[in-house]
Image (cartoon, rainbow, N blue to C red):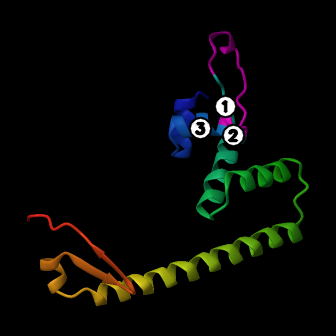
Amino acid sequence: MRIGELAEQTGMTRDAIRFYERIGLIRPERGPEGRHGYRRYNASTVRRLGLIKQAKALGFSLGEIQELLDAWANHSFRPDQKRAILADKIGVVDRKILELQELSSELKLALAGIRDECQSTGIVVVKDITATAPITGQ
């Protein structure tokens, strides 16, 4: 199949597919139309792009995805390795969630600290930081 059909089957854009090809996550075949420069893709590419899409949704970087795909292709991916990788990723996600919760709390405090008079003076106080901001007409 050509890139348009692959894009349709995977729900990815042609640009995304070309990017993944350029960085080595997928490899097209050169079919009988190869003399015209057309790239040909097969069902394994559809599966590989599905894995890429799923791994990205789970928060894996492209480098991590490359390692996962290499292990998957070599059939050297043991269950204990899968568990370790997923456990590590869960730790990363949990830390990110905590950071975002802290940021949300800080923003809520800042929001609660804004008084109506700030609108007329142009002075906004967030924690111990005072900054003057220009007043724009509405």
Q: Position of residue 118 (x, y in %)?
A: 19, 82
Q: Position of residue 61 (x, y in %)?
A: 67, 56
Residue type beneath disc 3: Ile
In this rendering, position of residue 94 left or right of residue 104: right
Residue type beneath disc 1: Tyr
Instruction: Give whichever of 47, 68 is nearer the camera.
Output: 68
Instruction: Give whichever of 23, 1 is nearer the camera.
Output: 23
Provide the major secondary structure of the magenta segment. Answer: loop
Residue type beneath disc 2: Thr
Disc number placed over residue 45 in the picture, else none:
2
Instruction: Specify the farthest residue to the top.
Output: 35
- The reply to whether dot 1 and dot 2 touch (C-beta < 8 Å) is yes
Q: Residue at x 70, y 19 (%)?
A: 31
Instruction: Give whichever of 132, 116 is nearer the camera.
Output: 132
Q: Determine the CA span between mark 2 and mark 3.
A: 10 Å
The residue to which callout 3 is attached is 17
Tell me which segment is drawn in magenta: 21-38
On screen, residue 62 above or below 15: below
The quadrant in which residue 84 appears is bottom right
Q: Determine the CA span between mark 1 and mark 2.
A: 6 Å
User: Few, some or many C-alpha atoms within 10 Å of disc 2 (few <14, some 14-19, many ≥20)?
Assistant: some
On screen, residue 109 above or below 83: below
Disc number placed over residue 102 in the picture, else none:
none
Q: Determine the CA span between mark 1 and mark 3.
A: 11 Å
Instruction: Specify the farthest residue to the left.
Output: 138
